[in-house]
Image (cartoon, rainbow, N blue to C red):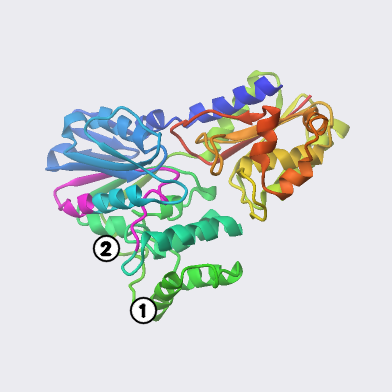
C-alpha cells in the first residue's frame, strides 16, 4: 500500500509536468502562434521577449524555447535554487524561496527592465508558476529587501492564507499586482500559468504580476489586524500601506485599466488535473476512489483529523465507500508555527493523521508537495501507516511532542518515512492520499 501511494502521487505529478502542459496550450504552426483559442501572426512582431518566475519556470521556458526557437530575442526568468533545465535563449537566475534574497531582487529588477524595453510591435511571453511571488522580490519605493523578507516570514508563520500573503506582497512590490503588465504595455503580453493556489485565481498566482488586482491597501491593513501583526511587521511596511490608504502611493492597476487591453492569461496546469490523474492511477491499481476536493484549505492539523475520521469510517462501516478505497484531496493548508522544530504542512499533516488514526490497521497516509519541497526542508512530505506510532514508541519518540514542536521532519527522519523526490520542476500545491484496505 505504501508503494501504491507513491505510485499514485507520481501519476499526479507527471500529469502536470510543465513542458507537456505548455505544449498543450501553446504551439507554433508556420508563422502562427496558437495560444489556447487565440492566434497570433508572428510576422507582426519585431521582438519576442520571454520573462517570468517560479519553481517550474525553467521547464516552462524550455517548452517555449522549443516552440519559438530563434524567434526569441531575449529572455530572463527567476527560478528556485536547483530548479533548472537546459535552455539557451533564456537566461535563468537562481534565487531564494520561500523567503526572497538578493539574487531574486537583482533578477526581478532585470525582468522589469526587460518588460519595460518592449514596445507596441513586440510580444512579451511570461511564464508563471508556484513560487513566483517570492522569486520576484522587487520592493516598492522606500522599502528594502529586508522589509519584504521580514514581512514574508511573519505572514507565513501566523497562518495567513496564500491569498492574504499575496495581497500584502502585491502592495509592497514594484512588479506584482499587475505592475509587470503595466511595464510591458503597450506590447502584446501573453502569460502561461501553472496554478499553485486554491481556486486558480489569476490575481493570486505569484501575486498576479500580469493581471488586474482586486485587493487594496485597505485589505492589507485588515490582514495585519486579523492576525495581530502590527508589532511584528516592519514599520516601513506599515507606513507604506498607510500611505496607500491615504492615496499618497498609487494603487495597483484594477480591472478595466487600459494596460490590460493587449494581455492574455492561460492556466496550463492546476491541482485538479493532478488529483484527477492520481484518481485514474488509483483505479488502475484496484481501489475505489473518492476525490474530496482540490480546494482544501485550513489549519493542517484540523484537516488531518477530518481525513483520519473519513478513513476510519470507511474501515468501520464502508461509508462513503467500501475498501479497498483511495481518498484524495488537493489544495494548500497552513501551519500556525508555535514550536521550534523543522517541518512543513505535508509532514505535519501526516503526523497529525497518524496520531488521529491511533495505529488503526489497514490505512496508509501520504501527503507531499508536487514541487518536491515541503516548507524549509529537503523532503516533499511523508508517509505513515498503522505501524508508524508503534515504531515511534519503540524508539521512545513521542508523536504528540513532535507535533506540538512543529518538528515532523525529525520525527519522520528517524523512522525513515520522509518522502524525498528532489525538485520535480512543477508546482500545483499538494496531493494527499489515504489508502484503506
Q: Nearer the viewer, residue 369 or 420?
A: 420
Residue 133: within the magenta?
yes
Q: Residue furthest front?
A: 396
Residue 247 bears which disc, if any? 1
The segment highlighted magenta reads: 113-139
Which residue: 51% across, 48% down? 197
Query: Mark 2 and mark 1 in contact (Cβ < 8 Å)?
Result: no
Reading the image, the residue beneath label 2 is 258
Locate residue 200, reporting x and y percent.
49, 48
Is residue 145 shown above or below 122? below
Q: At 34% from the left edge and 58% from the top edge, which residue is drawn?
A: 178
Q: Is residue 427 visible?
A: yes
- Which is more foreground, mark 1 or mark 2? 1
Q: Nearer the viewer, residue 270 or 398?
A: 398
In the rendered structure, does residue 221 fall within the stretch colored magenta?
no
**At x 21% / y 53%, what residue is drawn?**
113
Amino acid at each position: 500500500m505504501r508503494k501504491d501511494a507513491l505510485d499514485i502521487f507520481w501519476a499526479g505529478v507527471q500529469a502536470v509536468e510543465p513542458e507537456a502542459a505548455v505544449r498543450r496550450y501553446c504551439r507554433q504552426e508556420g508563422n502562427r502562434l496558437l495560444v489556447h483559442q487565440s492566434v497570433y501572426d508572428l510576422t507582426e512582431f519585431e521582438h519576442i521577449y520571454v520573462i517570468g518566475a517560479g519553481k517550474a519556470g525553467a521547464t516552462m521556458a524550455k517548452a517555449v524555447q522549443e516552440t519559438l526557437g530563434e524567434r526569441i530575442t531575449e529572455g530572463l526568468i527567476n527560478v528556485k535554487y536547483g530548479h533548472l533545465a537546459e535552455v539557451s535563449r533564456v537566461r535563468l537566475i537562481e534565487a531564494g524561496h520561500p523567503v526572497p534574497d538578493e539574487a531574486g531582487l537583482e533578477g526581478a529588477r532585470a525582468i522589469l527592465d526587460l518588460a519595460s524595453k518592449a514596445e507596441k510591435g513586440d510580444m512579451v511571453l511570461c511564464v508563471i508558476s508556484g513560487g513566483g511571488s517570492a522569486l520576484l522580490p522587487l520592493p516598492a519605493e522606500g522599502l528594502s529587501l529586508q522589509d519584504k523578507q521580514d514581512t514574508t516570514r511573519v505572514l507565513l508563520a501566523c497562518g495567513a492564507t496564500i491569498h492574504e500573503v499575496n495581497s500584502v506582497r502585491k502592495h509592497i512590490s514594484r512588479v506584482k499586482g499587475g505592475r509587470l503588465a503595466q511595464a510591458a504595455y503597450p506590447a502584446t503580453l501573453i502569460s502561461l500559468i501553472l496554478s499553485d493556489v486554491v481556486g486558480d485565481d489569476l490575481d493570486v498566482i505569484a501575486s498576479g504580476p500580469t493581471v488586474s488586482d482586486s485587493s487594496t491597501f485597505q485589505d492589507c491593513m485588515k490582514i495585519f489586524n486579523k492576525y495581530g501583526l502590527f508589532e511584528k511587521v516592519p514599520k516601513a511596511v506599515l507606513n507604506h500601506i498607510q500611505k496607500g490608504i491615504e492615496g499618497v502611493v498609487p494603487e495597483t492597476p484594477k480591472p478595466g485599466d487600459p494596460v490590460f487591453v493587449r494581455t492574455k492569461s492561460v492556466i496550463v496546469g492546476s491541482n485538479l488535473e493532478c488529483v484527477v490523474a492520481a484518481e485514474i492511477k488509483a483505479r488502475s491499481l484496484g481501489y475505489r476512489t473518492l476525490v474530496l476536493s482540490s480546494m482544501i484549505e485550513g489549519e493542517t492539523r484540523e484537516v488531518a483529523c477530518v481525513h483520519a475520521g473519513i478513513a476510519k469510517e470507511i474501515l468501520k462501516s464502508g461509508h462513503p465507500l467500501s475498501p479497498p478505497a483511495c481518498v484524495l484531496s488537493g489544495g494548500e493548508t497552513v501551519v500556525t508555527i508555535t514550536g521550534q522544530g523543522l517541518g512543513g504542512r505535508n509532514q505535519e499533516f501526516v503526523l497529525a493523521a497518524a496520531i488521529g488514526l491511533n495505529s488503526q490497521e489497514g490505512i496508509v497516509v501520504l501527503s507531499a508537495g508536487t514541487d518536491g519541497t515541503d516548507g524549509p526542508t529537503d523532503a516533499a512530505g511523508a508517509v505513515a501507516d498503522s505501524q508508524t506510532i508503534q515504531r515511534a514508541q519503540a524508539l521512545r519518540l513521542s508523536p504528540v511532542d513532535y507535533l506540538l514542536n512543529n518538528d515532523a521532519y525529525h520525527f519522520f527522519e528517524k523512522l525513515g518515512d520522509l518522502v524525498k523526490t528532489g525538485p520535480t520542476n512543477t508546482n500545483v500545491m499538494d496531493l494527499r492520499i489515504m489508502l484503506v484496505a
